[in-house]
Image: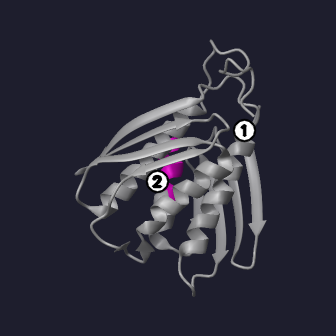
């Protein structure tokens, strides 16, 4: 069964289309209008082995907030749609990822009960044109729109670029694990019998 989702969302602030294949090879085409954000999403695709296409036309003349937050919303909806009934998947995923001086921890539960915990601080305000405060906004929006319990924690690091990149890659690896199949799982991995 193909786990592919296409989600579109248009508001007065953004026009977004996301295509996601959970069982891909890491092919991607990302155009958000924010170079560093594109770079992070490309890393997410590559390291999670997700085929990902994202096209965003946002109100960047204001700032990057709506573009980044709304991309999180739409990508989260695509993840939720692609995972579907969650039968046979591991549900939980975790990864500890080093990126030079930085060490990021990501843990996920695809429980359908959204919760977001973020423990990271940055030394500056921007990397390139990207506002670092938007990292938290992106992952918060994604976790709630997907119904995901998501924890991100920076265990060490000095370089802001490396910190953000470590988080996106750790998230990719944890999500890849959580969405992968385990032949021992029949139905969904829940005592309730449902993860919807």
SS state under label 1: loop
Front residue (pair 140, 129): 140
Report x, y in % for residue 122.
Answer: 31, 63
Which residue is depicted at the point 70% across and 50% down? Answer: 78
Report x, y in % for residue 9.
Answer: 76, 65
Pick whichever of labels 2 and 1 is earlier in the sequence.
Answer: 1
User: Which residue is identified by label 2?
Assistant: 43
Q: Tell me if mark 2 has few (under 14), some (14-19) or many (20+) residues whose alpha carbon lies within 10 angstroms of its own.
A: many
Which residue is depicted at the point 67% across and 52% down? Answer: 145
Q: Is residue 115 magenta?
A: no
Q: Is residue 44 magenta?
A: yes
Quadrant where the image shows the N terminus:
top right
Residue 12: give its label.
none
152 up-or-down from 110: above or below:
below
Q: Which residues are magenta?
A: 41-48
Quadrant where the image shows the C terminus:
top right
User: Which residue is identified by label 1?
Assistant: 3
């Amino acid at each position: 069964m193909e786990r592919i989702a296409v989600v579109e969302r248009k508001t007065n602030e953004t026009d977004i289309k996301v295509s996601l294949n959970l069982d891909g090879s890491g092919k991607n085409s990302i155009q958000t209008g924010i170079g560093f954000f594109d770079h992070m999403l490309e890393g997410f695709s590559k390291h999670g082995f997700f085929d990902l296409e994202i096209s965003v036309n946002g109100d960047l003349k204001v700032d990057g907030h709506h573009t980044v937050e709304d991309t999180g919303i739409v990508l989260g909806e695509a993840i939720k749609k692609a995972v579907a009934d969650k039968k046979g998947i591991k549900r939980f995923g975790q990864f500890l990822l080093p990126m030079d001086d930085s060490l990021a921890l990501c843990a996920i539960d695809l429980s359908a009960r959204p919760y977001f915990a973020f423990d990271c601080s940055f030394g500056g305000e921007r990397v390139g044109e990207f506002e670092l405060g938007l990292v938290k906004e992106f992952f918060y929006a994604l976790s709630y729109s997907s119904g995901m319990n998501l924890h991100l924690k920076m265990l060490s690091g000095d370089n802001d670029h490396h910190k953000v990149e470590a988080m996106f890659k750790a998230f990719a690896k944890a999500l890849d694990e959580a969405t992968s199949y385990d032949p021992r799982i029949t139905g969904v991995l829940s005592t309730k019998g449902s993860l919807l």
